[in-house]
Image (cartoon, rainbow, N blue to C red):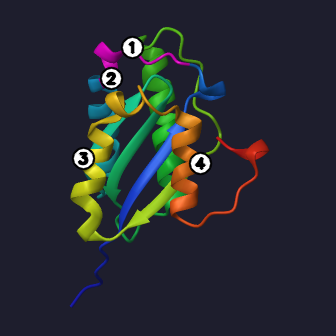
Amino acid sequence: MGSFTQITYQLVFATKDRTKNFVESEQERLFRYIQGILKKKNCHMHGINGYQNHLHVVFELHPSVALADLVKDVKVSTSLWIKQNKVFPYFTGWGEKYGAFTYGSSERTRLTEYVKNQKPHHQKVDFEEEFKQLLKEHGVDYDDRFLL
């Protein structure tokens, strides 16, 4: 019998300097591109969404894939793709940091719904406040100077 894992990740990362340059009409293309990257790495995506300057990706990480390598692949590949295809004209790159939070399979539906509703959520809460809340929920000590 093989190895089994069942860990759901929520990956959160922002644009360089948190510039708000995601044109809503083009986001779906970026989301499909990221889904293709995950699929090639044998990871299963449950949901993806973003708002203006950041993305949330909910996925299962394949046991043979290192999280840091996957994040690097996603950021490098999407940066090149965005620039080559002129998808977001003011995009200058991704910020160097990211947050990756784990969840049990019983939380996956709630998490996927949360990610799906980013636009209405961010009309009440800004990204920095949201990210701090995620850190607190997961018991991560942080210094405001070193946030995404």
* In magenta segment, residue 105: no
Is the C-beta separation of discs 3 and 2 under 8 Å? no
Question: Residue visible at 28% across and 81% down?
Answer: 4
Outermost residue to the bottom? 1
Which amino acid lies under the numbered mark 3 shown in the image of this protein? Glu
Instruction: Identify the magenta region.
Output: 20-27
Which residue was labeled with disc 1? Answer: 23
44 or 102, nearer to the observer? 102
Which percent across, then down, holds residue 107? 28, 64
7 w.r.t. 18: above or below: below
The quadrant where residue 92 appears: top right
Of labels 4 and 3, earlier in sequence is 3
Please determine whether, in this image, residue 86 is positioned above or below residue 133. above
- Three-letter amino acid code at the position of disc 4: Lys
Question: Tag 2: residue type?
Answer: Gln
> Toward the viewer: 129 or 26?
129
The Cα atoms of the two marked residues, 1 and 3, are separated by 22 Å
Instruction: Name the quadrant of the N terminus.
Output: bottom left
Q: Secondary structure at mark 4?
A: helix
Asked if disc 1 and disc 2 are in contact, CB closer than 8 Å, the reply is yes
Where is residue 128 drawn, in percent x and y? Answer: 59, 37
Residue shown at the point (33%, 49%) measured from the top left: 38
Residue matched to label 3: 113
**Of residues 42 and 25, which is closer to you in this image?**
25
Q: Which residue is mark 4?
A: 132
Name the residue rendered at 32%, 43% in the picture: 115
